[in-house]
Image (cartoon, grey):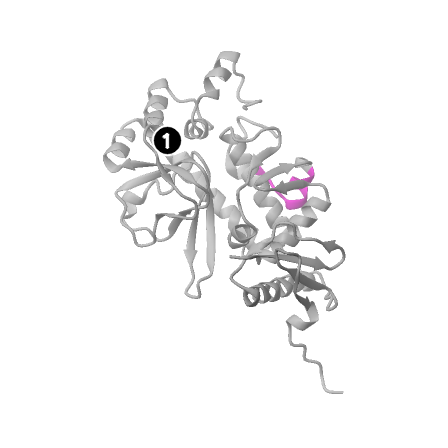
């Protein structure tokens, strides 16, 4: 299985040197979504939420697979103006 | 290997260096007689090689053997209907996979190797013979009670600690357990776990585990590369994760 690297851009730039073996880009997208949501949960428990933080996924050759902003990992409902 | 065990002489130290992880572990509580140690050593005579990520035993099996980790790592796990996996224990050399399953009858969870392993298959008759020795009965009870204490501590870890504390706590625990069976050099030991396996043990996603490992590195608490973990500041890691090794019941013999 190909290996994908999940670089995280939050309060710091966290380069993933280990990577995770996943079936394909679709599985990588699912993993990024789950990761972003979990990290947002952690933030929320500490009373904050940073929708602009993001995860950039690369393949083994360093090619960009996808970018996911935390804010795009959830549906946000706000009261109608 | 055993820097601070008991008030041992050089002779005792030399003797211990050749002991198996099982004897090292079971002697945590009390020194065993030579006959007891010989009986345990005989369990190591003919282990089977099992490849990485292979079943040692499956949920629903009715095993007629007890399994003992001789080399390598394994995990207890439960599979959920959606395919998700919860790891409920990591098993290292010297750990029994299923000490009392011949009493319970049917496995209520599975056990898989994580790395290439050597596993001893111990027949029921052989276990019955071992448990004719009262000191071994006590030692096996001790081992089972410590396994339960570890499980309690994992419940606390999953239920009440955030991801950073939970991973730090797990690393402290594995360090102390590996040290207790002589598999730590300095503050460095083999930790052949993937991000997924750590995540499956703690209910975390792989990406989150990766983020936390990076934070542990950037705060200079650990390094972790290619299955080799080094703790740079044990006291700080212990403090950051709220780790107290009392539940491992090894305080008689070692300090960190």
Q: Nearer the viewer, residue B160 or B184?
A: B184
Which residue sits furthest front?
Answer: A61
Q: Residue at x 59, y 66 (%)?
A: A29
**Where does label 1 land, which residue?**
B138
Quadrant containing the C terminus of chain B in the rendered view:
top right
Residue B36 left/right relative to B160:
left
On the image, the x and y values in percent for residue B216 come to 68, 46
Quadrant containing the N terminus of chain B in the rendered view:
top right
Q: Residue at x 30, y 26 (%)?
A: B133
The image quarter in which residue B101 lies: top left
Residue B241 forms part of the magenta stretch: yes
Q: Residue at x 52, y 51 (%)?
A: B197
On the image, the x and y values in percent for residue A13 come to 74, 55
Question: Crowding at label 1, few (<14), some or many (≥20) Cα neighbours within 10 Å?
Answer: some
Residue B188 left/right relative to A69:
left
Please identify the dominant SS of the magenta region.
helix
The image quarter in which residue B42 lies: top left
- Element under disc 1: helix
Residue B8 forms part of the magenta stretch: no
Q: Nearer the viewer, residue B122 or A28?
A: A28
Looking at the rendering, the stretch of residues picked out in magenta corresponds to: B236-245
- Is B66 drawn above or below residue A81 in the view shown? above
Which residue sits furthest left?
Answer: B125
On the image, the x and y values in percent for residue B15 come to 46, 17
Q: Residue at x 32, y 31 (%)?
A: B46
The image quarter in which residue B241 lies: top right
- Is B15 drawn above or below residue B148 in the view shown? above
């Amino acid at each position: 299985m190909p290996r994908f690297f999940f670089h995280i851009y939050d309060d710091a730039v966290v380069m993933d040197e280990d990577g995770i073996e996943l079936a394909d880009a679709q599985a990588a997208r699912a993993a990024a979504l789950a990761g972003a949501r979990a990290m947002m949960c952690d933030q929320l428990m500490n009373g904050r939420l940073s929708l602009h933080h993001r995860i950039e996924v690369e393949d083994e050759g360093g090619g960009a697979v996808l970018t996911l902003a935390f804010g795009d990992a959830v549906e946000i409902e706000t009261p109608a103006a | 290997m055993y820097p601070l065990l008991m008030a041992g002489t050089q002779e005792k130290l030399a003797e211990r260096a050749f002991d198996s992880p099982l004897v090292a572990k079971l002697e945590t509580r009390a020194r065993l007689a030579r006959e007891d140690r010989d009986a345990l050593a005989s369990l190591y005579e003919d282990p089977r090689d099992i490849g990485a990520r292979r079943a040692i035993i499956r949920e629903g099996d009715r095993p007629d053997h007890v399994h003992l980790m001789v080399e390598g790592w394994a995990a207890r796990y439960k599979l959920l209907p959606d395919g998700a996996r919860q790891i409920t224990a990591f098993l290292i050399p010297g750990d029994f996979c299923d000490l009392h399953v011949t009493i319970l009858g049917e496995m209520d969870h599975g056990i898989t190797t994580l790395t290439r392993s050597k596993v001893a298959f111990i027949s029921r008759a052989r276990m019955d013979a071992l448990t004719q020795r009262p000191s071994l009965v006590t030692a096996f009870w001790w081992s089972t009670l410590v396994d339960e204490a570890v499980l309690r501590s994992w419940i606390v870890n999953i239920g009440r600690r955030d991801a950073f504390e939970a991973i730090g706590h797990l690393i402290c625990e594995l360090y102390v357990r590996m040290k207790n069976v002589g598999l730590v050099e300095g503050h460095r030991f083999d930790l052949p776990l993937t991000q997924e396996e750590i995540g499956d043990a703690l209910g975390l996603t792989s990406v989150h585990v990766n983020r936390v490992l990076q934070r542990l590195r950037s705060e200079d608490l650990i390094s972790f590369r290619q299955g080799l973990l080094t703790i740079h500041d044990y006291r700080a890691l212990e403090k950051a994760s709220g780790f107290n090794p009392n539940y491992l019941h090894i305080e008689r013999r070692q300090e960190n």
